[in-house]
Image: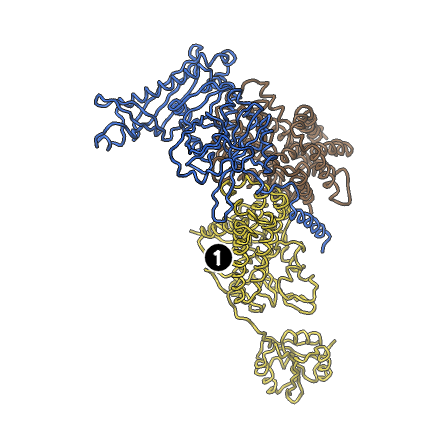
Chain colours: A brown, B blue, C yellow
């Protein structure tokens, strides 16, 4: 069966996965660097990503190929395409690690106190493997359903946390450029998501209104995330730096002293469900990249290898989330930036050159 | 059966065996100590932690809960809390702990050395209310109250009631206290609990057994006389160090500058027919406006407070007509009330200024609203600030 | 084998094929020529055969051909037969076959009269408002019930015979101007390919035509009520009637159909919406409540409000079983009681309820075997379980799965299982229709008949996932 994603589903994927992946430790990391300027810092990240979205959509629109791999083959030959796909395969594989560890830590913090990770989190990879096997059609439909749960989670989280925020804590919104850029820099590893569209567009059925619709969903994702950062900093102020797993913590203050029970956990549960799909997406794309390069008779081999490898890595680094995040924000961001921003730019230029209209010689 | 189904069946069997054995570090709910309040006292060896545990009565009909108080000592707070589990065999569950009491001994040093533990640990909710005690925290948790079987529940009721509204009880949480401490103004306040002995011994029979019965280390500080708690005074902090105490009306009016009123009371001397009397006036509604301006380089804290008042009681006889007007205040009394609030707040401001506790958060305001001047003025901004207050009182109809 | 001119040869051949004592061979004369009526004692209407067939034949004067004989009869359904195989087929169906000496063909007359149950309200789909007729085991009556409601020339009934031994008649029913051809063709192809000994009930057909044979989720719709059947045909679905089964099938099927009741369309829309929301809530409670309760007790005490937690702790004091095993055992008892009470005669059923409620419930609590909250949770889950009767089979398995995972790894296990289940259901199509339509893929038009349904006047289009020829269902003019 050929995989199919409708444009509407692509928009849901953009909104849900681009937002929820930034909900856990990113707000605290940015608050550590930019303090009250965090919303602006993250907004800057989104503006950069919006430019990337424009680049990506232009590539998709200009490309006459069926998919990204075919486009790369046309531009750089099969060897070049294979190398690029291999690099992107590794990129998506590594990009999944931090969010997975974030999720693992937040799960342990919210749900468990004494149980071992092997038991409480590792079954995630079993589900991720299953989702990858079932492909993008099923994935995109699932995201469509989880969209409503995500919205419900947002309503719960925001309605509980907005009243407990002191919004003057966000002043002065802008202090120094250095402070602002420091936050933008520290959040970089959580951004660069629009590059995913390059790998998904071959499955999109009807590309009419691609830019308009993706831009709207991207903007919705940006607004949601920035709003989260605003409320997060308004709730925590100077101690925001310490408050990892924002959505789990910021909505509890209007509820913990009441007798109605921890309604805020409802939001945490919903976000965890949405995150299962959001965390699987990079693994799926990584699997897609490697499947293009290595062909196995059994379809499950590559997804299995990816899930097992990721499982081993996350088990190994299970208590190293914060040092690892620091390592990524200090060093790895350079590679990520090259892959997310520079390579798409190069591909855009190459595509434009390749697809420019050849001037007809007079009289020819 | 399909091959795949067989695999699923095997997985199911593995899960099911685990399900039956529960052999994966699970802690039985019956072995869990549901800590509802935690008290910290400083001792020579380090810290003494007193925890109050909600213990349900083992009857089918009654769900009435009883309490148990356990003590543990440790060089650090973490060590002491951990010891509770080790020495009693119970697993301490801190997520229900909504009240943290700091004994008077804790304030000898920087209080953040204690509060720090609660913002570090994910096991304790930082939404827990933080309060100070005139005596040791242990004695507060060991006390018997006619208000509730569990002393901390009785205390929580006092704090939670006015959490989001103005009150003479300056309720604060671990999060709020830490946020204020780490802010530019680096201030803090927390309500101070005083235990007032009552004559009423009628309710203490059921609780008498609770004190120290399941204690880890004995309960010599336990009291047998029922007490009620007064938390209408507060301790104030500068940079984590306790620098002073404020009480009663000061707390109420200070809190009115921050939160809306919720039927709070203060007493006012009134003159009627050349006779002096005392009226109990309730603040039914309020509006506040506080900002920091720079007037010729001098920081000025402008506070504007509008209060809607009503006479609820007075120690002088009133005519039926006066009572029928539902506690309306005369113009003069309204002016007196405004003046009283203004004077109290001015005194309060002078006091906090004298002890250098920037509880108004003036330095924060300077940073937020006059960032450009912050570098220049921040060092002595609080001391240089002039306080202007205008209170207008209205009759609450 | 062809029929012989000699009646005795034909008789012996048929006797050989139909070697059964309930086959009657009735000899008589037609204009002096010996004739033989062969029929099944149990299925044939003997009065009809005697009055409408044999009596006119006795009086017949001209015997030139079989055709001329059939013209003399007043019965409309007469058909000439040339082969032994056709004769036996007609006889076992209940018709009578008439052989006349000297002719190498026979003729059959429709005299079948099977025992038929009266059309009544089906016990599984009773309604307060709306039609009360239900399908019966006779396919002809069922077709007539459909025809009565759908007097359209576009209603097509295709007859198929399935089952090597049972030779069950199956009818493919659809509206030619509405139903999607690919669904009709797909269903026809799948039914024709069924190669089994016998089709005893329409559920056999379901098992044979579904794509996912191991799935516990329904992939074909089923109903006992002709009004629902017709409503589904009007939406663009294809119906299947099976002889001998009061349950008609419809395809494609989506999960939402289980939450829709025929009554929803007969009552006030507001109430119908409330009922649908209740059904969804009940299903969620039924499946997830025991699991969440166990996981909260084992892993996430903080999820439970302190006062309720203290109640739980006080009630579980001294219970020898762990929360998960306690819940599992109680659930098992509930399932056994359920299984037994469904099949018990009604008067024993009452005794069973008493044993279940009092002896097992009350005494187990008093004896300290299980706690009261557990009994309450199971009871609540059990009640919710019956809010959507069509989902019962699936829900009971799902509930057990969720409970096991919750006891094993707590809340995150429930989340992971939900994610896996969601992926599984989204990978599912029933004759081209995505199983979770209209929510995934989202179709705003089809949401009009979703959990929250639009007013009748607003539901102007047919469901788009059915890819019907004719998209407009109705037009309202003010």
**Nearer to us in this view, C270 or B96:** B96
Q: Which of C43 and B220 is in front in this view?
A: B220
Is residue A170 visible in this depiction of the protein?
no
Q: Quadrant of the N terminus of chain C?
A: bottom right
The location of residue C89, given as percent across then percent down, is 67, 73
| Dot 1 alpha-carbon crowd within 10 angstroms: few under 14, some 14 to 19, many 20 or more | some
Above or below, C181 against A23 in this view is below
Q: In this view, does C18 lie above or below A116?
A: below
Q: Nearer the viewer, residue B276 or A290?
A: B276
Query: Can see residue C47?
Result: yes
Q: In this view, does C400 lie to the left or right of B212?
A: right
Image check: B366 left or right of A18?
left
The image shows residue B126 at horizontal and vertical percentages of: 53, 30
The residue labelled by disc 1 is C263
Which percent across, then down, holds residue C272? 47, 52
Look at 54% across and 40% down and name the residue there: C303
Classify residue B118 by image quadrant: top right
- Which residue does the image show at 56% across and 34% down from the upper left? B216
- Position of residue A96 measured from the top left corner of the image (x, y, whole percent): 67, 34
Q: How many labels does the image show?
A: 1
Q: Mark 1 lies on which chain?
A: C
Depth order, front residue of C368/C300:
C368
Q: Is residue A189 above or below residue B26?
A: above
Q: Which residue lies most toward the bottom here?
A: C32
Q: Is mark 1 on a helix, strand or loop?
A: helix
């Amino acid at each position: 069966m050929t995989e199919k994603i409708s444009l509407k589903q692509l928009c849901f994927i953009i909104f849900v996965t681009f937002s929820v992946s930034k909900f856990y430790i990113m707000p605290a990391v940015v608050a550590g660097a930019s303090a009250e300027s965090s919303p602006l810092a993250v907004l800057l990240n989104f503006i950069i990503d919006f430019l990337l979205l424009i680049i990506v959509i232009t590539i998709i629109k200009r490309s006459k190929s069926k998919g990204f791999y075919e486009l790369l083959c046309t531009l750089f030959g099969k060897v070049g395409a294979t190398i690029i796909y291999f690099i992107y395969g590794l990129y998506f594989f590594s990009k999944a690690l931090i969010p997975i560890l974030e999720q693992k830590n937040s799960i342990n913090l919210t749900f468990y106190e004494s149980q071992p990770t092997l038991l409480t989190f590792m079954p995630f990879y079993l589900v991720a493997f299953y989702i990858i096997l079932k492909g993008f059609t099923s994935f995109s439909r699932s995201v469509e359903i989880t969209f409503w749960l995500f919205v419900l989670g947002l309503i719960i989280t925001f309605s509980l946390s907005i009243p407990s925020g002191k919004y003057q804590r966000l002043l002065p919104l802008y202090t120094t450029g250095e402070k602002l850029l420091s936050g933008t820099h520290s959040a970089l590893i959580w951004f660069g998501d629009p590059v995913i569209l390059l790998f998904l567009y071959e499955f999109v059925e009807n590309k009419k209104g691609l830019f308009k619709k993706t831009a709207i969903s991207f903007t919705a994702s940006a607004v949601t995330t920035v709003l989260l950062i605003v409320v997060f900093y308004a709730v925590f102020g100077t101690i925001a730096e310490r408050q990892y797993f924002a959505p789990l913590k910021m909505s509890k203050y209007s509820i913990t002293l009441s007798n109605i029970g921890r309604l805020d956990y409802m939001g945490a549960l919903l976000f965890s469900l949405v995150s299962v799909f959001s965390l699987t997406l990079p693994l799926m794309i990584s699997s897609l990249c490697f499947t293009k390069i290595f062909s196995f008779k059994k379809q499950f081999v590559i997804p299995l290898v990816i899930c097992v490898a990721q499982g081993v890595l996350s088990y190994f680094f299970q208590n190293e989330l914060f040092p690892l995040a620091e390592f990524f924000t200090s060093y790895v961001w350079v590679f990520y930036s090259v892959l997310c921003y520079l390579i798409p730019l190069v591909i855009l230029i190459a595509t434009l050159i390749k697809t420019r209209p050849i001037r007809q010689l007079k009289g020819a | 059966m399909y091959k795949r189904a067989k695999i699923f069946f095997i997985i199911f069997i593995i899960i099911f065996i685990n399900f039956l054995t529960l052999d994966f570090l699970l802690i039985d709910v019956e072995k869990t100590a549901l800590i509802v309040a935690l008290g910290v006292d400083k001792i020579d060896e380090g810290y003494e932690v007193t925890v109050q545990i909600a213990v349900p009565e083992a009857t089918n009909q009654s769900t009435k809960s009883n309490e148990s108080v356990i003590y543990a000592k440790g060089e650090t707070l973490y060590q002491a809390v951990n010891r509770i589990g080790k020495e009693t065999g119970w697993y301490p569950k801190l997520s229900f702990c909504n009240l943290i009491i700091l004994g008077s001994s804790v304030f000898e040093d920087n209080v953040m050395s204690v509060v720090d533990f609660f913002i570090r640990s994910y096991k304790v909710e930082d939404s827990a209310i933080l309060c100070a005690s005139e005596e040791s925290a242990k004695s507060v948790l060991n006390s018997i109250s006619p208000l509730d079987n569990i002393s901390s529940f009785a205390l929580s009721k006092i704090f939670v009631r006015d959490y989001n509204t103005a009150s003479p009880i300056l309720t604060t949480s671990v999060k709020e206290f830490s946020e204020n401490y780490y802010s530019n103004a680096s201030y803090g306040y927390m309500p101070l609990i005083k235990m007032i002995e009552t004559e009423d011994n009628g309710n203490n029979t059921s609780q008498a057994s609770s004190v120290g019965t399941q204690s880890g280390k004995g309960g010599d500080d336990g009291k047998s006389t029922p007490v009620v708690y007064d938390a209408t005074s507060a301790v104030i902090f500068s940079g984590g160090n306790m620098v002073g105490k404020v009480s009663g009306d000061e707390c109420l009016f200070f809190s009115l500058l921050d939160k809306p009123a919720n039927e709070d009371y203060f007493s006012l001397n009134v003159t009627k027919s050349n006779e002096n009397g005392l009226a109990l006036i309730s603040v039914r509604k309020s509006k506040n406006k506080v900002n920091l301006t720079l007037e010729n380089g001098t920081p000025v804290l402008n506070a504007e407070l509008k209060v809607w008042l009503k006479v609820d009681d007075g120690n002088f006889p009133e005519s039926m007509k006066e009572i029928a007007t539902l506690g309306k205040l005369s113009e003069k009394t309204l002016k007196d009330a405004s003046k009283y609030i203004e004077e109290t707040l001015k005194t309060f401001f002078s006091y906090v200024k004298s002890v250098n506790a920037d509880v108004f958060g003036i330095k924060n305001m300077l940073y937020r609203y006059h960032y450009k001047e912050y570098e220049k003025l921040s060092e002595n901004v609080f001391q240089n600030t002039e306080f202007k207050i205008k209170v207008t009182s209205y009759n609450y109809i | 084998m062809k029929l012989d001119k000699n009646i005795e040869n034909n008789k012996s051949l048929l006797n050989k094929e139909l070697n059964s004592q309930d086959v009657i061979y009735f000899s008589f004369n037609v204009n002096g020529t010996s004739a033989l009526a062969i029929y099944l004692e149990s299925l044939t209407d003997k009065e009809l055969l005697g009055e409408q067939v044999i009596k006119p034949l006795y009086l017949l004067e001209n015997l030139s051909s079989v055709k001329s004989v059939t013209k003399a009869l007043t019965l409309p359904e007469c058909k000439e037969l040339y082969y032994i195989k056709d004769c036996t087929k007609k006889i076992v169906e209940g018709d009578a076959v008439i052989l006349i000496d000297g002719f190498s063909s026979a003729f059959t007359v429709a005299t079948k009269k099977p025992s038929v149950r009266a059309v009544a309200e089906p016990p599984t789909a009773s309604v307060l408002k709306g039609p009360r007729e239900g399908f019966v085991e006779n396919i002809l009556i069922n077709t007539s019930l459909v025809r009565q409601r759908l007097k359209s020339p576009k209603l097509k009934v295709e007859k198929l015979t399935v089952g090597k031994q049972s030779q069950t008649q199956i009818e493919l029913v659809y509206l030619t101007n509405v139903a999607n051809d690919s669904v009709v063709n797909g269903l026809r192809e799948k039914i024709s390919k069924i190669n089994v000994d016998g089709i005893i009930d329409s559920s056999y057909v379901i098992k044979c035509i579904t794509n996912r044979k191991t799935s516990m989720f329904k992939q074909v719709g089923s109903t006992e009520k002709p009004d629902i059947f017709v409503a589904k045909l009007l939406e663009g679905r294809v119906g299947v009637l099976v002889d001998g089964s009061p349950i008609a099938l419809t395809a494609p099927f989506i999960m939402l159909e289980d939450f829709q009741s025929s009554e929803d369309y007969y009552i006030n829309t507001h109430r119908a919406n409330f009922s649908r929301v209740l059904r969804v809530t009940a299903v969620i409670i039924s499946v997830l409540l025991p699991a969440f309760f166990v996981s909260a007790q084992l892993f996430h005490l903080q999820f439970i409000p302190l006062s309720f937690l203290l109640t739980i702790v006080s009630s579980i004091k001294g219970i020898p079983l762990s929360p998960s095993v306690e819940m599992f055992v109680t659930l098992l008892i509930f399932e056994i009681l359920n299984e037994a009470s469904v099949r018990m005669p009604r008067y024993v059923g009452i005794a069973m309820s008493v044993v279940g409620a009092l002896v097992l419930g009350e005494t187990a609590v008093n004896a300290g075997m299980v706690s009261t909250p557990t009994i309450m949770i199971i009871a609540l889950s059990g009640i919710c379980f019956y809010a959507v009767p069509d989902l019962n089979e699936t829900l009971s398995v799902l509930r057990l799965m969720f409970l096991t995972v919750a006891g094993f790894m707590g809340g995150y296990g429930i989340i992971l299982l939900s994610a896996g289940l969601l992926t599984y259901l989204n990978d599912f199509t029933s004759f081209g229709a995505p199983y979770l339509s209209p929510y995934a893929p989202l179709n705003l038009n089809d949401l009009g008949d979703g959990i929250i349904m639009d007013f009748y006047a607003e539901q102007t289009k047919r469901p788009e996932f059915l890819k019907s020829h004719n998209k407009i269902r109705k037009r309202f003019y003010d």
